[in-house]
Image (cartoon, helix red, strand yellow):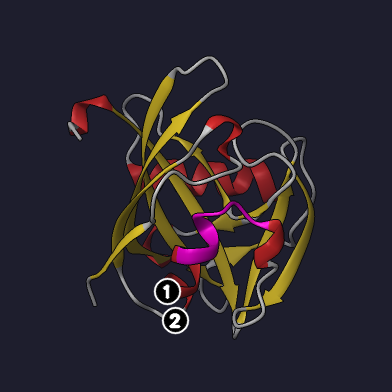
Amino acid sequence: MNLRSFETMTVCFPVKGDHVLLSVKTRDIGKGCWNGYGGKVKPRETRREAAVRELAEESGLIAHLGALHEMGFMDFRNTDESGQETRVRMYIYLVYLVHSWDGEPRESAEMVTPTFFPCNRLPLDAMMPADRIWLPHVLTGRKIRGKAVYGPGQKTLIGEVEIIKLA
């Protein structure tokens, strides 16, 4: 995959002890699924700045740039119902509570029902199919890179999710 064809996005998973904060997406890719907080990197914005902005917009939590731990990335190919393909490089960040954010999680127009789940008991059946595979690796502290190809509506995977553990 040619990197220039990717849209760069971020996702944050706030972690408090052995629990991770997830919310249910209300629109776009992942609608109705438990997920972390994130979105597109804007022009002249770093990935870390985008991660902090998206986390604040979607959860009300204010993270500190230095508290973001880059855990790797996943490359996604998404196909819509018309056959149009979108390629996404999503950078994965963890935010730790103790020195990481200010505020309490709240609902937003895009994310509802903020809930802390034990990292070893995620709501896997209610998450996007590829997230069920890569997120548990990241939550154990492993850095990864990988790729996944989704069919129409991002409800099914085409082929296997590829994960390379980096650390």
Q: Answer yes or no: do the residues labelled 1 and 2 have beta carbons within 8 Å?
A: yes
Query: Left or right: where does residue 80 sit relative to residue 159?
Result: right
- Which stretch did the figure color magenta? 127-133
Foreground residue, 116 or 76? Answer: 76
Q: Position of residue 119 (x, y in %)?
A: 60, 79
Which image quadrant is residue 14 in? bottom right
Any part of residue 30 in sight: yes
Q: Determine which of the numbered discs, if any, sits on residue 140 in the image.
A: 2
Q: What residue is rendered at 39% in x and 79% in y? A: 141
Quickly name the residue at label 1: 137
Seen from this angle, which residue lies furthest front? 159
Query: Left or right: where does residue 129 sit relative to residue 48?
Result: right
Q: Mark 2 belongs to which amino acid?
A: Thr
Count neighbours of disc 1 (C-alpha within 10 A) and say few if under 14, some if 14 to 19, many if 20 or more. some
161 is within the stretch colored magenta:
no
Q: Position of residue 46 (x, y in %)?
A: 32, 40
Q: Position of residue 164 (x, y in %)?
A: 25, 66
Q: Mark 1 belongs to which amino acid?
A: His
Q: Quadrant of the N terminus?
A: top left
CA–CA distance in space, label 1 to label 2: 5 Å
